[in-house]
Amino acid sequence: MTGRKVLLENVNIPGIETFEVYQKNGGYRAVDKALKSMSPDEIVEEVKKSGLRGRGGAGFPTGMKWSFLAKPEGVPRYLVCNADESEPGTFKDRYLMEKIPHLLVEGMIVSSYALGANLSFIYIRGEFMWILDILEKAIAEAYDKGYLGKNIKGSGYNLDLRVMPGGGAYICGEETALLESLEGKRGNPRIKPPFPAVKGLWGCPTVVNNVESIAAVVPIVNDGGDAYAQIGLGKSTGTKLISACGNLARPGVYEIEMGISVEEFIYGDDYCRGIANGKKLKACVPGGSSVPILPHYLVTKTATGEDRLMTYESLSDGGFVSGSMLGSGGFIVFDEDQCIVRNTWNFARFYAHESCGQCSPCREGTGWMEKVLHRLENGNGNLRDIDLLAEINKKIEGNTICPLGDAAAWPVAAAIRHFREEFEWHVTHREESQTRNFGLISQPVTA
Amino acid sequence: MNLHVDINKRHAERKEFSPESLAKVNELMLDVPEGKHKSAVLRVLHMAQDELGGWLSIETMDYVAELLNIQPIEVYEVATFYTMFHLDQTGKYVLEVCRTGPCMLVGSDKIIEYIENKLNIQVGQTTEDGMFTLKTVECMGACGYGPMLQCQYKNHEFLTPEKVDELIEGYRSGTFEK
Ligand SMILES: Cc1cc2nc3c(=O)[nH]c(=O)nc-3n(C[C@H](O)[C@H](O)[C@H](O)COP(=O)(O)O)c2cc1C
Ligand code: SF4
Ligand code: FES
């Protein structure tokens, strides 16, 4: 792995947030090229060839998503960029938009052209209001230079780009809730089908993509889908922004070439430089709060003893039994002093707080899980509670309108699967568990 | 959960936007296809909260409904769904401390406790002088820079007790005024 970068290469150039400096460093070449010499379908083809998978969490192939977009005659189509970024552990889109806003604007222009959209939106979480200002400034510059508006660069293509804020609701990251919110309503997810590709914003065909996915279209158009597919490893093509947090010596946002090892990412000098304060690694949630937690012995190695790599495939190696997911790239690291029960409760509280309340299994189930975990954490639980949690889990899973229910259930199931010993200790050592943490979990002999 | 709401406390004197802000509202309504101007409601509610007293009284929400030419209920249902909108009067500065996992791993619990003690209030309360309201919020997208809090859209990151002292002093004396 050579550690190639295609998104953040220029991020430290002074003034890169301005049109002038951005363009001087190769910016807006993709728009020039696309509008002059490529048809919309050719761009979709390049994106398919690149193997780019959605960077918002689900990893769905972007080119394929684009090719599903319905194109009825006389009906507008929309591209909506998902900049809601609220999955705990994730703060990468924010970094990109703050540091190099024109990369997103450029990606929006090229992608909108590929999809035949003439009005596109960036939906950004309301707490990022200052980034909304940064984006609007960049957009104003792009209008000024003829890269947005009517007849862009004499091509005959028209595009308007708007930024819309949310109001503080994790659920609005879910694409149909996002569209509801964009329409000025409560963020209640819609029942699918119909999918947004057929009936999305205001009932029109719509593509929703993550900030990073849209930014990645820029290097794909510049250098071609094949060149992009050369970066990375196997089906995990390209680079990925990883936001690393928790007990790390050097937390932050890193653009990694997919395929580096988890070991290198956590301990390498170019990346996180190990666990903070010389402590030991206890566990890791590698893809945002919704993905399964891994105990220390499954973080850098898979259950079969192979090196675990930063790819979609390797991080999910072992399925839900001994693997996790790349998810959104929110990489959360726990040191030996952390309490898994407390953290599981904390995440359960998050989902209970953020459930939109439409489906009873999610609305009630997330609340129950929070209560049960709270009493376990505080030394008031009993052993049956652990099984009760698994029971609630099963009632939520697959029985809800949107995946938030699953996202709430899976982390609890994974924590109990790997850290049952620690949960039980909270019951058998009620007082002790209130004054100290359990420490490192031992590796099962027959892992 | 506080189920009883004292509705009288949710009323306040009607306030209106400046001419510049009104022009901005009109611009926002024209930014979207004809008839879809309702989509501006979140943005306009943020403007209203920021410019008309720091919270959304029933009068302010009714005013927003008038401006956008939609029913008041369409504004209420939105304002009550999203956590950034304050439906009760707040202090001059609302300190919103992130309480979610990644921040907790690096000590947000202690910071919350420290602020409670320092301001002599609990989470959800406002200081007697009306200067500060303390709230906890879920992940703010700043997890690598925790513990953190946001106040008036400004993030304060890598918080320590010393930094908390400094920033509370800063707000009290007006140094952090935006
Ligand atoms: C509860 C929930 C929250 C989500 N939050 C986000 C988010 O904050 N940002 C994001 O890009 N995608 C989020 N997603 C995924 C989106 O629904 C959608 O799949 C994604 O934006 C598609 O973009 P991509 O294909 O480019 O990844 C969330 C999904 C769910 C179920
Ligand atoms: S699963 Fe939860 S968040 Fe999703 S629609 Fe149902 S109640 Fe709302
Ligand atoms: S957990 Fe605090 S900002 Fe994400």
Image (cartoon, coloured by chain):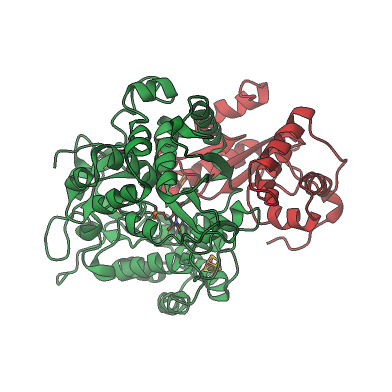
Chain colours: A green, B red
**What is the x, y in percent for residue B16?**
82, 36
- Which residue is nearer to you in this view: B50 or A391? B50
**What is the x, y in percent for residue A204?**
55, 59
- Which residue is nearer to you in this view: A183 or B139? A183
On screen, residue A370 versus residue A309, left or right, reads right
Query: Does residue B105 lie above or below B27 as drawn?
Result: below
- Which residue is nearer to you in this view: A408 or A189? A189
Dividing the picture into quadrants, the one containing residue A414 is bottom left
**Which quadrant is home to the N terminus of chain A?**
top left
**What is the x, y in percent for residue A166?**
58, 48
**Which quadrant is home to the C terminus of chain A?**
bottom left
Query: Does residue B15 lie above or below A412 as drawn?
Result: above
Query: Does residue A53 lie above or below A275 as drawn?
Result: below
Report ligand 2 position as a quadrant.
bottom right
On screen, residue B67 versus residue B125, left or right, reads right
- Which residue is nearer to you in this view: A140 or A45? A45
**Picture residue at 41% right of the left edge, 75% below the top:** A386
On screen, residue B168 versus residue A259, left or right, reads right
